[in-house]
Amino acid sequence: MRARAGFGRIERWDDARGFGFITPEDAAAGDPDRVFFHVRDFDRSGARPDVGTRVRYTPQQQADGRWRAVHVAAVGSTQTPRTARAASKPRDARAPASTPAGGTRGPLIAIVIWCALLGAGVVSRRLPHLALAALAGFNVLTAAAYAFDKHAAQRGRWRTPEAHLHLLELLGGWPAAGLAQQLLRHKRAKPAYRKVFLAMVVLHLLALGLWTFA
């Protein structure tokens, strides 16, 4: 059973699992105080859903009696007046375009250090050739995991847990992860994820350095 369309705000959103809850603005007596919705029911012509976003939706009662929001679409803006004014200011023509956190110099330096450590490990025979094959395999697996997660995010399907991606990065797949973030435009705009990713890179390089020179 469907009710008339209404308005509300997203009070909770789990981006990894692709679902959230909407708090109605004008809930009548007997109406649910919050409504479940899935990313499949969200209009994906714009940005992905986020907490605080005002939306228009149609409540639909399911066979088990629970309510679900369908035809969910963002309306208006969630910007505060200060951020809205800042966003409306024209960009200085001389200002360079924004780049992901860390730019490109950091990853290049990390890759140079990684290659140097691998070379030192091979020359000193501290690093067996089987380990190099394993690292190559982890990079292929990491690239596939990122591509799968990106595909799932676009279609509202079950996502790969971020902990699994970080584990692959820690095991040596971080170069492929960094490349996938840029080429697929995936995960690079999430500061919290990027911080953990950089931590995985540092930990991997430290472990490789200790294995090679300790």
Image: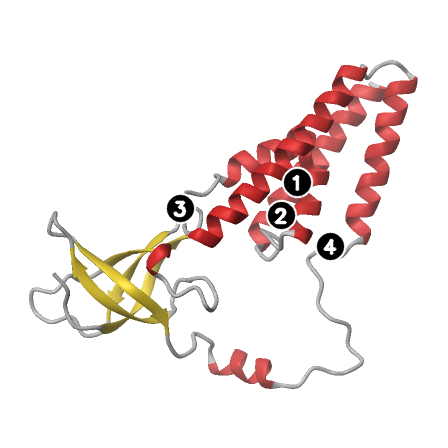
Mark on residue 199?
1
Residue pointed to by mark 3: 17
Q: Position of residue 169 (x, y in %)?
A: 64, 35
Can you tell which of label 3 and label 1 is closer to the viewer? Answer: 3
Q: Mark 1 near mark 2, Cβ–Cβ under 8 Å? A: yes
**Residue at position x 18%, y 61% in the image:** 60
Seen from this angle, which residue lies furthest left? 30
Q: Position of residue 15 (x, y in %)?
A: 43, 52
Q: Quadrant of the C terminus?
A: top right
Which color scheme did the rendering employ for the protein? secondary structure
Q: CA distance from mark 2 to mark 3?
A: 21 Å
Q: CA distance from mark 2 to mark 4?
A: 10 Å
Could you tell me the amino acid type at mark 1? Ala
- Counting residues from the N terminus, which is met first, the one under dot 4 or under dot 1? 4
Residue pointed to by mark 2: 195
Residue pointed to by mark 4: 102
| Label 1 element class | helix
